[in-house]
Amino acid sequence: MSSGARPAPGTGGGWSRRRFVGVLAGAAAITTVPAPAAPRPDEPAARAPLPRTPPAGPPASASAPAPASPAPSPDAGPRPLLLGTYTSGDGSGRGIGVATYDTASGAITGRGVVTGVDDPSFLAVHPDGRTLYAVDERARGAVTAVRLPGNEVLGSRSTGGSGPCHVSVHPSGRWLLSANYASGSVAVHPLDASGAPGERTALVTHSSPAPGPGQQGPHAHQFVTTPDGGHLLAVDLGTDTVYTYRLDETRGTLTEVSRARTRPGAGPRHLTFHPGGRYAYLANETDNSVTVCGYDPATGRLTVGEPQSTGTGGGTSYPAEILVTSNGSYAFLANRGDNSLTRYAIEADGARLRLLDTVPVGGDFPRHIAFSPDGRLLFAANQRSGTVTVFAVDRDSGELRRTGEPFASPVAVCALPL
């Protein structure tokens, strides 16, 4: 790796590929997958409170499609926006950014910072909207809970691994799921009535298969619940594998039930589902591709389809995050190297992606993208430019339109609109 790479957060100089990629990365295509077996300014004030606008239904996780309803009306007033960052290194943030956005114009207004959380690079919210969770992406990884809307830090728990980069909440609201990138493991914590995490109940390290080409070990990058609620999926970039687990909802333990392999060196990073629940779309960071996967709710098994183009040309563009509109018609992929969003039309009830075009993101290195709860806006957190860009989404045509100038936010790596 180049000597220009930044040290990993909290390691005192150890190397982090995630930081390395974030700092240094400077014709229609159709793929069909067989259907699975049936039915088988940074700191105006510390911890400024969020506006007390109630959530419009259960907020979506950062990896889920925008919900179809209920949706706030354009005149519903400002809504909360929370921003993840790194707090270590030159030019980094001071904690979780607190802002609001206008639901009609998309304009963002800074409201302060939640301090006391180290390297909160990924955020998720509890289904009841009252608790925010952040990873502490450090060598001794942790997850931290923050009470909303007052921004009170409830406490942290060790994830049992290094460099946690993803967190999600089980739909029951009783379990917190996290992925440790550097150590290649996934963890489960119970959540009490206040939303605070308890002691870890499960920790599984991906010890096999062997790391893919160019990888030194497993790198768990995402840990989420399937739409039917029956299984958990762990996407591991280092082993080119998506692991399916069953969660014991009484004890919080994990049992592996299947594995889905991508082609060697694909580097799967992030997965999201079609609203129909039978197909998922996998963004592959290393080989610059996406794949359509069939999902069988009965077994939890994924069937990985053939890789297809991101529309960004030769070389790698480090695909980061993929989203699907709640009507299941379009998908959007963030390309960090190309600084663009790829638009796909979704066809055949979710079984096929058709590449439409790429749209400039208006920032440098879009690490994370997310829909507003009503699906009208798309937010892109641009890590290297330290900005958040906002697009209006035409749900009928899939067209994206920039809504204004980017909002400045130091090392913006996650945007969570509520």
Image (cartoon, rainbow, N blue to C red):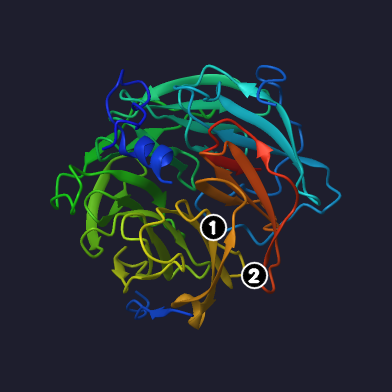
Residue 265 in which image quadrant? bottom left
**Can the viewer see residue 109 in this picture?**
yes
Q: Secondary structure at mark 2?
A: loop
Task: Using the image, determine if residue 215 lies above or below residue 275.
Answer: above
Check disc 2 and give the amino acid type. Gly
Neighbours of disc 2 within 10 Å: few (<14), some (14-19), many (20+): some
Q: Is residue 197 above or below residue 348?
A: above
Q: Which mark is residue 398?
A: 2
Q: Mark 1 = which residue?
A: 340
> Three-letter amino acid code at disc 1?
Ser
Residue 361 circle label: none
Number of marks drawn: 2
Identify the residue shown where x is 56% and y is 58%.
65
Q: Mark 1 to mark 2: distance in Å?
A: 15 Å
Q: Residue at x 38, y 35 (%)?
A: 19
Report whether residue 179 is seen. no
- Relative placement, left or right, of 290 versus 357 is left
